[in-house]
C-alpha cells in the first residue's frame, strides 16, 4: 500500500524473517531489503497531496443506530438537483436472515446492517468534507490519521479494491485494534504484485491460523484474508 508512515531500518537477516508459503519474487537475492523495527514518520508531503485530491476518501464513525438515517439523508441530498455538488459516500451493509419467531422457527425476516459498525466513508478533499460536515452535521468529525495527527485521506486507487472486497467478501476484511507498528516489528514489508490489491504494501502475519496481509489504511491496521496466493516482492 502506498500510504505508509513507516521507514525500514536494517537490523536482521531477511531470510530469517520472510513468511513461508507465499510467492516472493527475488527473495533469494543476497542483497535483500530490510526488516521493519522502529517506525519513523515520513515527510507529510504525501499526505498533503492525497488530502487535496477530490477523488480521495476520508471516514468517520457514527453511532450504529444513526447510520441508516444518515445514509437516507445523503441519498436525498444527492438526489436533490438544487445542490450544485453531490457528496459521494460508501457504507457497506451485509444482509442476513433470521426467524421472525425464534422459538417456533416460523417466518423469515431480512436483516440489513453495516459490515463495520458505524463506519462511513466520504469522498472529496479533506477541506470540502470538513466544510460539508460543519454545515450539515457539526456533531460529526473525520477520524484522524494517527501517523499525521490530521484527518485521514485515502487515495481512490487504494479505496476501490477495498470497497470491492467489502462488497464481495466482507468476511475477508478485519479492522485491527493494534497499531501497525505492532505488526511491522521484526517483519519484512512486502508489496503485492498481482491481483486486485496490486501495489498494496504490508506484512504477512498469521492471524487465527490464517496468513493475512496486514497493511496501514489511513493510520489504521487492517487485515486482509485471501491474498496468500498472490505474488509479492520485498518493498525497499
Image (cartoon, rainbow, N blue to C red):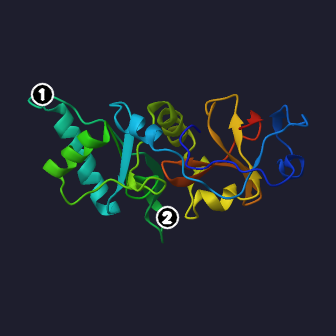
Query: Eyeballing the image, is 233 above or below 11?
Result: above
Q: Taking 125 as reference, is 95 above or below it?
A: below
Classed neighbour count for the residue bearing mark 2: other residues with Cα under 10 Å, few (<14), some (14–19), many (≥20): few
* Gap between marks 1 and 2 measured at Cα: 46 Å
**In which quadrant is the N terminus drawn?**
top right
Q: Is residue 207 visible?
A: yes
Q: Is residue 164 left or right of residue 7?
A: left
Count of marks, rendered view: 2
| Residue 214 pos. (x, y %) | 65, 50
Does dot 1 land on a helix, a strand or a loop?
A: loop
Secondary element at tag 2: loop
Which mark is drawn over residue 49?
A: none
Q: Label 1 belongs to which residue?
A: 81
Location of residue 150 with respect to 31 vertically, above or below? below
Split into 4 quadrants, where in the image is the C terminus? top right
Q: Residue at x 35, y 61 (%)?
A: 64
Mark number displayed over residue 105: 2
Q: Position of residue 129 (x, y in %)?
A: 26, 43
Which residue, as the protein is rendered here, is positioned at the far bottom?
A: 103
The image position of residue 47, as x and y in percent, is: 43, 41
What residue is at 59 percent from the left and 54 percent from the top? Answer: 40
**Camera sees residue 109:** no
Say which residue appears at 21% left-offset and 49% top-offset: 133
**Nearer-the-camera pick, 123 or 4:** 4
Q: Earlier in the sequence, mark 1 or mark 2?
A: 1
Please provide percent x and percent y for residue 83.
12, 32
- Is residue 181 or residue 33 the one in the foreground? 33
Which of the two discs, 1 and 2, sits closer to the camera? 1
Quadrant of the image occupied by residue 89:
top left
Where residue 92 sits, quadrant-wise, is: top left
Cβ atoms under marks 1 and 2 closer than 8 Å: no
Amino acid at each position: 500500500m502506498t500510504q505508509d508512515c513507516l521507514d525500514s531500518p536494517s537490523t536482521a537477516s531477511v531470510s530469517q524473517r520472510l513468511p513461508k508459503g507465499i510467492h516472493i519474487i527475488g527473495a533469494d537475492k543476497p542483497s535483500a531489503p530490510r526488516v521493519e523495527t522502529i517506525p519513523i514518520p515520513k515527510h507529510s508531503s504525501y499526505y498533503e497531496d492525497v488530502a487535496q485530491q477530490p477523488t480521495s476518501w476520508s471516514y468517520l464513525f457514527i453511532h450504529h443506530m444513526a447510520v441508516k438515517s444518515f445514509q437516507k439523508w445523503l441519498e436525498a441530498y444527492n438526489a436533490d438537483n438544487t445542490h450544485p455538488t453531490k457528496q459521494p459516500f460508501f457504507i457497506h451493509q451485509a444482509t442476513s436472515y433470521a426467524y421472525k419467531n425464534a422459538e417456533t422457527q416460523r417466518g423469515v425476516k431480512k436483516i440489513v446492517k453495516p459490515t463495520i459498525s458505524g463506519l462511513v466513508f466520504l469522498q472529496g478533499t479533506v477541506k470540502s468534507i470538513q466544510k460539508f460536515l460543519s454545515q450539515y452535521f457539526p456533531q460529526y468529525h473525520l477520524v484522524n490519521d494517527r501517523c499525521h495527527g490530521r484527518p485521514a485521506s485515502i487515495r481512490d486507487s487504494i479505496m476501490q479494491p477495498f470497497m470491492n472486497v467489502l462488497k464481495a467478501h466482507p468476511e475477508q476484511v478485519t479492522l485491527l485494534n493494534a497499531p501497525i507498528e505492532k505488526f511491522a516489528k521484526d517483519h519484512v514489508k512486502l508489496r503485492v504484485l498481482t491481483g486486485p490489491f496490486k501495489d498494496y504494501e504490508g506484512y504477512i502475519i498469521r492471524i487465527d491460523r490464517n496468513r493475512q496481509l496486514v497493511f496501514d489504511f489511513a493510520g489504521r491496521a487492517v487485515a486482509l484474508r485471501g491474498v496468500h496466493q498472490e505474488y509479492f516482492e520485498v518493498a525497499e
